[in-house]
Amino acid sequence: MTGSLRPLIAGNWKMNGSRATTRDLLAGLRAFLRESGPAGCDIVVCAPAPYLPLAADRLEGVSEIELGGQDCHTAVSGAHTGDVSAAMLLDVGCAYVIVGHSERRADHGEDSETVKAKGETAIASGLTAIVCIGETLEDRDAGRAVDVVGSQLDSSLPDGTDAANTVIAYEPVWAIGTGRTPNEAEIGEIHASIRARLLDRTEDGSGVRILYGGSVKPENAAAILSVPDVNGALVGGASLDATAFWSICQSCP
Ligand code: PEP
């Protein structure tokens, strides 16, 4: 963990839940906050777009938990049926948006140039972009994880990135939702390489947070979060359970 960077734990609910589970999950997190006080990290929950207004309502007055979207369009507005703009996310109370998640890259054919454009629109709209990058198992087995992640970062990084407007999420595709994770040395190697590239590419490279994502659970969170240059986590499955998510938030060093 880079000493001075405050960790960020981001929950990605993906396409899960309902009005009822949104209410329950946020009530659970609010109860933990009341009982234990702030967790020592920034917290964001990225709910499905239809539930963001309800989530914003349930988080009214809760400054410790911010809201995020799971994607936004490259355009500010217009004829893009079914899409959501960064400005709309901001309007309903979001502070963050995930761009370039591997599930969107796979399901919607998003390439890094599109991800970069989405990140730039998000930033211009006043959101912090969580830019996802990560290698496939084939890349890792072939020994090219560092190179693949590096070139994805180069082509996905929004112009104008700084510590306030961009977060990088390293998510090995083969670790997402599988229960498998790279070991700590492997995570450390990739995060160090991302940090070096950020230092090279941006003025503010030492301040940009780099999250690890992929099967983070209460059982492995403390070990992963203490790896150098791991500045938090992007959490999928475990963010759907208030107890598990809160436990991960409390695992930050
Ligand atoms: C994710 O969706 O970004 C993710 C990391 O999922 P999981 O924690 O379930 O592997």
Image (cartoon, rainbow, N blue to C red):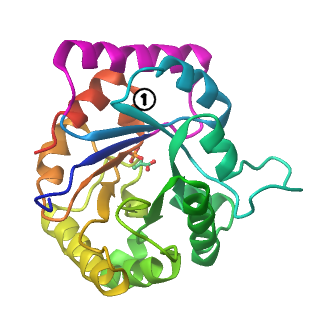
According to the picture, the residue beneath numbered tag 1 turns out to be 240
Q: Residues within 10 Å of mark 1 (few under 14, many from 20)?
A: many
Q: Element at badge 1?
A: helix
Q: Is residue 244 left or right of residue 20?
A: left
Q: Where the N terminus falls, by quadrant? A: bottom left
Relative height, residue 78 to residue 245 (above, below): below
Place residue 136 in its image quadrant: bottom left
Ligand 1 within 8 Å of the CB at mark 1? no
Image spot of residue 114 (x, y percent): 64, 72
Residue 23 among those drawn in magenta: yes
Relative height, residue 178 to residue 27 (above, below): below
- Residue in the foreground of this view, choosing between 163 and 25: 163
Residue type at the position of mark 1: Leu
Q: Which residues are magenta?
A: 12-39
Q: Is residue 44 left or right of residue 246?
A: right
Image spot of residue 188 (x, y percent): 17, 68
| Residue drawn at 69 percent across, 43 percent down | 88
- Residue in the foreground of this view, choosing between 184 and 205: 205
- Residue 142 seen in the figure: no
